[in-house]
């Protein structure tokens, strides 16, 4: 039939609308009511109620308890089959089950009511159709409880009150189907009594949901147990709405917009004008009629860009044309261009990365399309008197930011002597106000940082967060106006000598990410709280993260550092006497009497309680925030980056616009716990529900999220671990009805220099409908199909970021997924950065000072050794790392960045003495780019250092029969957890320790029986023993130190020159043997054979031929003499050479000859020197390296091994098979380790208040 003319089209569409409104198409409903299990007498009332309401709508409603109706022919006449209060095995015959299955697979819809979840328990397919199965219910089958109705738009729930008090039997299910179903409502378990041992689904207990099995629709409600329930018109309307949605039947009075949408769909189908985006939009009829809003399969997550090593993605903002700005902490502002699927550099700032500073945030001016303005918050490296962070305006032209257009708007002084909390999120509200979040810039302890001692202002948040005359610890709000700004009249204070007018909300610790409600302009934020693990009546509450809200016209004080969470006060503390004052702060009438306060002293605005809050471990008040992964229970980091309003955040007709279900909702992430939550508000703006969001998707520390004009949600993931594995720009798109295809794509070598050959894999790709798939690969997202095999290989020849797109097609569905490929120019090689010292795994003691030495080699730029790379271009940042638990993810609190090849950091101090701590040295060098303008590259490396006291519960592995059980220690000196249940033959493994300068080891614990031993081995459970610790009987609970000497785990060669000399250079001959040689090493000098300090020549590991002094290795084929100049000369009696090279093969490590020269370049005689070594072959004693004969040498007599080792604590008993040998607390490594200057342990040294 030809397409109608415009006039005919209008008439046709009107006719279709009239047909729909008059319900010309009959709707036939089958109520199946057989009860082969538990009997529900309410079935009579249920049948009556649904039949009456169905007839009102013009439906034909048939009820039957006869299973013989389940034949293909009979079921084909029904639009929906309702299992109404069914139970037990109601379909005994396989043919009946197959008929139901075929009916659903062909598009017939299903509705289950209440005990339908306890029907056909032996049929897995039916369980999937339901969504979840009945597990149990309380003994009291008729309890009043509160139902939280989270979907305010679906026909089955829109007619219900937001909080519905109703009596019913509250079913518990065998699992939580969230993510695989769209939840309409859930029951608040705190409002009824549960007496079954596993009768709780905790905070997220769904009781009504929809989903889309293949071409069908399924609705289930757990309500409807009793006759009384069916007398409630709300319940009847609830079930009728579910049936109407499932059967795609007309409601009694559907909204006119709904009728118009359906008419338009049919009209456009008739005209064959179904373009892709229109089809996607228009298929969503009747608001939430697709029933797919909460289904993870309704979303597609694409990986668009993998951040390079050293790039710490912080923040993003979307331009009006859909391009995405990406803020990288090291100073780069990147631009993702969705039209060509690539990322370019659009600006670079010279920033410091000290503590948490850097390039932190960007916001897009509301009039960007006409003025090109961006607002950038950053930490200029050049501004030092005082140090400060700056909010500036710039102009963007094309794909580049013109840095010469800077207009400085706000400068905020900041101290960089101690970490943490910079904040830096920047956004506009819809009234044209710019909002900036700023952290309290205070060194953190577990409690409130209120240390007012002279010199300790870095530990006093009263100087900032509680100071009305300071911009830190605040949300700031200004209205940009040309090159200046005005202050909104509804801010917290009028500006005067003791108040900053820019303050919108005060009393904040770390408001890291916030969201603006685009309808009301209220601001929501996640407040990252302190780390204390338990409440202490003498100090204050357990640490909590908060979710807070400040209304547009109601600014306020949120309590820090005096109050936390639900306005729980901290207790005043005397830091001079280190004693509690046992006086809680007054949350209702806070006062700031700190000498570091420059603002209002008394009568501060009252502290406001958080909207929601949660603690480490499992939260009692808000269990919704408990971790999905229990290994992450000891970490928290609240991220609240986005608030959605349907039709306001983005045009409702945008192709990927979120449906109405998400209206009035805050999208929340926990950076540490790697989950997403949806916080829905009620009609008054009060928190209504907190539910899991996207639970089947994986996340790697979400940092930020923003919406694009097409409805796409762009998300920055920071990545995991020290290398930020998985750091990427992701995109979530809502696609409506779920897709049966699950697209999985992976690639090898996703980054590297051109030409880059990448092998792609589709392992894990499936189609739930079983239909065969065809593969279409577009390797550069340019619309060209480059391959049609499942696992192709492609070589990228051109520099740049490409996004490889796989499109999968079956006869009924299409799905695509992506993987980003970063191709570096062949004209620029990545820099090779090495932390020469301290060594990886080196051991330090809290309070020590540690030297560092870093070197760089870059093919194009040169090296730090030859002067081609100035040391001032390096960035060396130490930091305190900690992991809240053995298996918990770790993170680092950076300290002051150093711009030098050599220097000192420390004293190194911990924050929580019994957590899993380490120190971290990161070295970074951004090169200058390559020929023909090829892009710069970043070289990054790090060394992880270990404290001398190591909790034994932090083991990295154990023997299969070792329980590794832990319990809270009863040791009076503390120690976190004890390890117990250790038997004869068990072992525990501890990775990555460098035992340099460690002379003994101490185990602390007790043994009731004694007669046991701990063998400390390296490399394996049967490796070389470096210490044996006999454990005598101490009596139960009597903790004792067991200390023994330890053999040096490094391979070393040492000479005693018998007296001290000033040495200007050394000469080494590695020998000419193919099977042994110096592979990588460091040279130390000492006057007393006790204090060694930093290596006088720390060299890199590796084995590139030929030998060069800058990389510190010797190739297999090298012959000749190595001259090592010491500048300046050193005074020493002892020279020690230590192997730090990799154990790449079984070669021995050796020295053929060693010579030393004094400050007059005179060779020192070796006749009286005494040589010793870690080990030796039988015919190669150390002294042979001093005999002047190149054909004789010292050799280890054992395979080479690197300096850092894996330790195995193996347990044995004098009685074979003995159980429960001892209880162990921690081990201590004794000796100098890598420390340069030991300091008194315990209290951090004072720091200057001048900054």
Image (spheres, grey):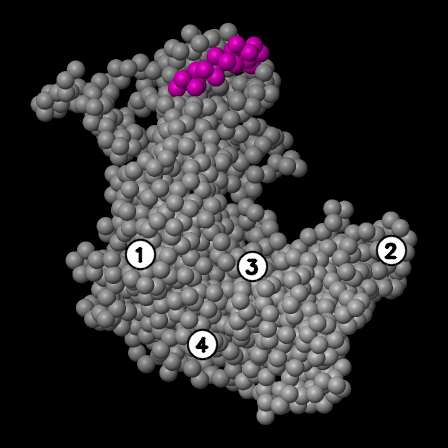
Query: Residue 300 at x, y = what percent?
Result: 39, 39
Nearer the observer: mark 1 or 4; the answer is 4
Distance, label 1 to label 4, CA atoms, is 32 Å
Kindly indicate the quadrant of the structure image that contains residue 28: top left
Query: Residue 1048 at x, y = what percent?
Result: 73, 69
- Secondary structure under tag 4 reads loop
Distance, label 3 to label 1, CA atoms, is 31 Å
Residue picked out by circle 4:
866
In the figure, is residue 1105 to the left or right of 382?
right
Q: Residue at x 62, y 87 (%)?
A: 1157
Where does the N terminus fall, quadrant-wise?
top left
- Secondary structure under tag 1 reads strand
- Identify the mark nearer the N-term, 1 or 4: 1
- Secondary structure under tag 3 reads loop
Nearer the observer: mark 3 or 1; the answer is 1
In this rendering, does residue 488 appear at all?
A: no
Nearer the observer: mark 2 or 4; the answer is 4
Question: Mark on residue 1213?
Answer: 2
Residue 354 lies, with reference to residue 577, above or below; the image says above
- Identify the mark nearer the N-term, 2 or 3: 3
Question: Mark on residue 890?
Answer: 3
Distance, label 4 to label 3, CA atoms, is 37 Å
Say which of 499 and 119 sits in front. 119
Say which of 1081 and 563 sits in front. 1081
The magenta span reads: 90-108
- Identify the mark nearer the N-term, 2 or 4: 4
Residue 745 lies, with reference to residue 750, above or below; the image says above
Say which of 927 and 516 sits in front. 927
Q: Residue at x 31, y 69 (%)?
A: 391
Residue picked out by circle 1:
344
Distance, label 2 to label 4, CA atoms, is 58 Å
């Amino acid at each position: 039939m030809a397409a109608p003319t415009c006039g005919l089209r209008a008439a046709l569409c009107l006719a279709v609308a009239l047909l729909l409104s008059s319900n010309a198409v009959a709707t036939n409903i089958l109520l199946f009511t057989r009860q082969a299990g538990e009997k529900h007498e309410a079935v009579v009332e249920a049948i009556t109620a649904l039949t009456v309401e169905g007839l009102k709508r013009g439906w034909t409603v048939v009820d039957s308890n006869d299973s013989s109706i389940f034949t293909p022919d009979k079921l084909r006449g029904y639009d929906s089959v309702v299992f109404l209060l069914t139970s037990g095995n109601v379909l005994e015959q396989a043919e009946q089950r197959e008929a139901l299955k075929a009916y659903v697979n062909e598009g017939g819809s299903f509705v289950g009511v209440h005990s339908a979840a306890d029907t056909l328990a032996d049929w897995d397919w039916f369980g999937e159709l339901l969504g979840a199965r009945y597990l149990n219910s309380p003994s009291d089958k008729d309890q009043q409880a509160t139902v939280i109705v989270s979907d305010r738009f679906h026909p089955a729930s829109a007619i219900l009150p937001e909080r519905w008090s109703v009596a019913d039997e509250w079913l518990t299910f065998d699992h939580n189907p969230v993510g695989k179903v769209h939840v309409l409502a859930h029951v608040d378990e705190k409002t009824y009594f549960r007496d079954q041992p596993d009768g709780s689904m905790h905070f997220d207990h769904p009781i009504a949901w929809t989903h889309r099995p293949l071409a069908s629709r399924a609705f289930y409600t757990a309500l409807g147990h009793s006759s009384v329930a069916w007398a409630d018109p709300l319940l009847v309307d609830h079930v009728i709405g579910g049936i109407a949605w499932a059967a795609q039947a007309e409601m009694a009075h559907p909204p006119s917009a709904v009728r118009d949408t359906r008419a338009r769909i049919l009209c456009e189908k008739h005209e064959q004008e179904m373009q892709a985006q229109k089809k996607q939009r228009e298929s969503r009829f009747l608001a939430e009629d697709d029933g797919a809003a909460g289904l993870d399969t309704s979303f597609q997550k694409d990986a668009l860009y993998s951040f390079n090593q050293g790039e710490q993605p912080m923040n993003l903002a979307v331009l009006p044309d859909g391009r995405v700005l990406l803020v990288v902490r090291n100073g780069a502002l990147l631009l993702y261009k969705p039209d060509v699927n690539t990322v370019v550099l659009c600006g670079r700032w010279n920033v410091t990365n000290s503590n948490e500073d850097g390039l932190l945030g960007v916001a897009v001016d509301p009039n960007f399309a006409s003025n090109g303005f961006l607002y950038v918050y950053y930490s200029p490296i050049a501004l030092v008197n005082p140090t400060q962070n700056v909010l500036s305006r710039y102009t963007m032209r094309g794909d580049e930011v013109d840095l010469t257009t800077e207009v400085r708007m706000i400068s905020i002084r900041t101290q960089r002597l101690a970490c943490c909390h910079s904040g830096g999120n920047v956004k506009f509200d819809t009234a044209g106000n710019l909002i900036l979040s700023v952290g309290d810039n205070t060194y953190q302890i577990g409690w409130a940082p209120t240390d007012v001692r002279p010199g300790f202002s870095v530990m006093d948040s009263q100087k900032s967060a509680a100071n009305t005359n300071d911009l830190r610890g605040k949300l700031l709000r200004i209205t940009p106006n040309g090159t200046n700004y005005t202050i909104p009249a509804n801010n917290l204070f009028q500006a005067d000598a003791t108040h900053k007018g820019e303050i919108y909300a005060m009393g904040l610790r770390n408001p890291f990410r916030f969201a603006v409600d685009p309808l009301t302009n209220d601001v929501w934020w996640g407040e990252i709280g302190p780390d204390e693990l338990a409440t202490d009546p003498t100090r204050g509450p357990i640490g909590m993260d908060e979710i807070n809200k400040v209304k547009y016209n109601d600014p306020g004080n949120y309590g820090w550092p005096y109050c936390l969470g639900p306005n729980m006060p901290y207790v005043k503390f005397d830091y001079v006497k280190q004693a509690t004052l046992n006086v809680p702060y007054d949350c209702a009438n806070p006062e700031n009497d700190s000498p570091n306060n420059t603002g209002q002293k008394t009568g501060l605005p009252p502290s406001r309680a958080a909207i929601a809050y949660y603690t480490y471990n499992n939260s009692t008040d808000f269990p919704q925030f408990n971790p999905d992964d229990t290994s992450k229970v000891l970490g928290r980091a609240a991220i609240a980056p986005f608030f959605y309003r349907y039709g306001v955040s983005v045009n409702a007709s945008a192709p990927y616009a979120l449906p109405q279900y998400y209206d009035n909702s805050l999208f929340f992430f926990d950076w540490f716990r790697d989950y997403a939550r949806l916080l829905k508000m009620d009609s008054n703006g009060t928190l209504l529900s907190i539910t899991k969001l996207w639970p089947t998707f994986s996340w790697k520390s979400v940092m930020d999220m923003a919406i694009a004009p097409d409805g796409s949600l762009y998300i920055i993931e920071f990545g995991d671990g020290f290398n930020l594995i998985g750091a990427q720009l992701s995109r979530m798109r809502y696609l409506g009805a779920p897709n049966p295809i699950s697209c999985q794509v992976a690639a090898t070598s996703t980054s590297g220099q051109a030409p880059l050959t990448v092998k792609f894999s589709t392992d894990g790709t499936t189609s739930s409908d079983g239909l065969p798939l065809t593969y279409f690969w577009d390797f550069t997202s340019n619309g060209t199909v480059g391959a049609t095999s499942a696992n192709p290989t492609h070589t990228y020849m051109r520099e740049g970021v490409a996004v490889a797109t796989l499109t999968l097609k079956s006869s009924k569905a299409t799905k695509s997924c992506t993987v980003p490929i970063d191709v570096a120019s062949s004209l620029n090689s990545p820099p090779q950065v090495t932390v020469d010292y301290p060594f990886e795994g080196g051991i330090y003691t809290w309070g020590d000072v540690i030297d560092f030495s870093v070197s760089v080699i870059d093919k194009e730029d040169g090296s730090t050794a030859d002067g081609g790379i100035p040391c001032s271009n390096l960035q060396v940042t130490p930091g305190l790392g900690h992991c809240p638990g053995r298996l918990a993810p770790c993170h680092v609190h950076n300290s002051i960045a150093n711009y030098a090849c050599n220097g000192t950091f420390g004293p190194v101090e911990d924050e929580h003495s019994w957590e899993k701590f380490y120190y971290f040295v990161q070295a970074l060098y951004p090169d200058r780019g390559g020929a023909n303008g090829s892009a710069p590259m970043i070289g990054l490396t790090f060394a992880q250092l270990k404290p001398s006291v190591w909790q034994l519960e932090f083991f990295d592995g154990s023997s299969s029969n070792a329980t590794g059980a832990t319990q809270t220690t009863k040791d009076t000196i503390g120690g976190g957890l004890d390890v117990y249940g250790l038997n004869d033959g068990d072992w525990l493994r501890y990775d990555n320790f460098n035992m340099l300068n460690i002379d003994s080891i101490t185990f602390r614990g007790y043994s009731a029986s004694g007669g046991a031993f701990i063998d400390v081995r390296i490399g394996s459970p049967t490796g070389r023993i470096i210490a044996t610790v006999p454990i005598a009987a101490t009596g139960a609970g009597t903790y004792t130190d067991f200390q023994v000497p330890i053999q040096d785990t490094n391979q070393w060669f040492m000479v005693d020159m018998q007296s001290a000399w000033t040495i200007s250079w050394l000469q080494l001959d590695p020998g000419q043997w193919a099977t042994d040689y110096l592979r990588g090493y460091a040279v130390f000098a000492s006057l007393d054979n006790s204090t060694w300090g930093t290596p006088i020549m720390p060299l890199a590991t590796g084995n590139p031929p030929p030998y060069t002094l800058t990389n510190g290795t010797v190739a297999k084929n090298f012959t000749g003499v190595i001259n090592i100049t010491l500048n300046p000369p050193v005074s020493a009696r002892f020279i020690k050479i230590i192997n730090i090279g990799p154990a790449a093969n079984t070669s021995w490590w050796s020295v053929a000859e060693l010579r030393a020269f004094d400050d007059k370049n005179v060779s020192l005689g070796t006749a009286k020197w005494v040589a010793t070594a870690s080990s030796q072959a039988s015919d190669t004693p150390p002294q042979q390296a001093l005999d002047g004969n190149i054909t004789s040498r010292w050799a280890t007599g054992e395979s080479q091994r690197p300096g850092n080792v894996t330790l195995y604590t193996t347990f044995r008993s004098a009685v074979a098979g003995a159980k429960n040998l001892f209880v162990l607390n921690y081990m201590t490594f004794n000796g100098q380790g890598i420390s340069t200057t030991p300091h008194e342990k315990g209290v951090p040294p004072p720091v200057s208040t001048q900054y």
